[in-house]
Amino acid sequence: ENTAGAGQGIGETFEQLAAIRDAAGASERVGVCLDTAHLFAAGHPIHTAEGLEQVVQDCARTLGLAAVRAVHLNDSKVPFGAKKDRHWHIGRGYIGLEAFWRILTHPRLAALPFILETPKSTWQEDRRNLTTVRSLVEDHAPRRRARRVPA
């Protein structure tokens, strides 16, 4: 899995992930999970339409999209490029609903398994996050809601 780039490990860039995969040997059997909050915190601009396209292209060129086996789906409680791993609820952090709609419906990503990895203090939070994700995919457009960014 990619990291947020907090400085205590490797894996914040696609080049680092490719090096780890190659060092493991039998790289065709070693997959990668992309984490949306980690990408955002590490400085990959997945929150904009142009940025997401560039990130997908960079990943395809460096790792190959066949190496991406899953996506951990979570918003970010910290601003872009903060280098901190702070997951937040879908559409309620700095990445935002429109970006999640683009990620979930991107033609080169949509067939991947998406795994919610959001804070879980109650089961209702999981239900709310899942409802939000389903509405983005089923409605094919983000619902216009005020984005609540953590203080």
Image: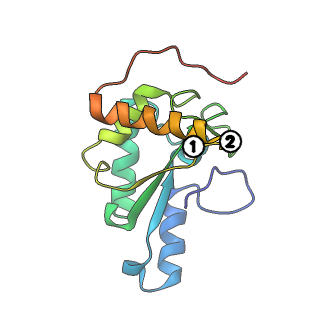
Q: Quadrant of the C terminus?
A: top right
As drawn, the residue found furthest toward the left would be 107
As drawn, the residue found furthest toward the front would be 123
97 with respect to 8 (left or right)? left
Which residue bears the numbered disc 2?
86
Q: Is residue 105 above or below residue 144?
A: below
What residue do we see at 36% from left, 48% from top?
Answer: 56
- Under circle 1, the secondary element is helix
Circle 1 packing at 10 Å, graded few (<14), some (14-19), many (20+), is many
As drawn, the residue found furthest toward the bottom would be 25
Query: Could you tell me how many numbered marks the image carries?
Result: 2
Give the colouring mode of the picture. rainbow
Q: Decide which of 62, 119 is in the foreground and name it.
A: 119
Give percent across and percent down for residue 55: 41, 46
The amino acid type of the residue labelled 2 equals Arg
- Under circle 2, the secondary element is loop
7 with respect to 33 (left or right)? right
Indicate the quadrant where residue 7 lies: bottom right
Between discs 1 and 2, the one toward the N terminus: 1
Q: CA distance from mark 1 to mark 2?
A: 7 Å
Give percent across and percent down for residue 94: 58, 28
The amino acid type of the residue labelled 1 equals Ala
Q: Decide which of 117, 128 is in the foreground and name it.
A: 128
Which residue bears the numbered disc 1?
37
What residue do we see at 57% from left, 27% from top?
Answer: 92
What residue do we see at 70% from left, 44% from top?
Answer: 84
Q: Is residue 101 above or below residue 42?
A: above
Q: Decide which of 117, 19 is in the foreground and name it.
A: 117
Q: Are marks 1 and 2 in contact (CB under 8 Å)?
A: yes
Image mark for residue 10: none
Give percent across and percent down for residue 1: 55, 61
Indicate the quadrant where residue 13 lies: bottom right
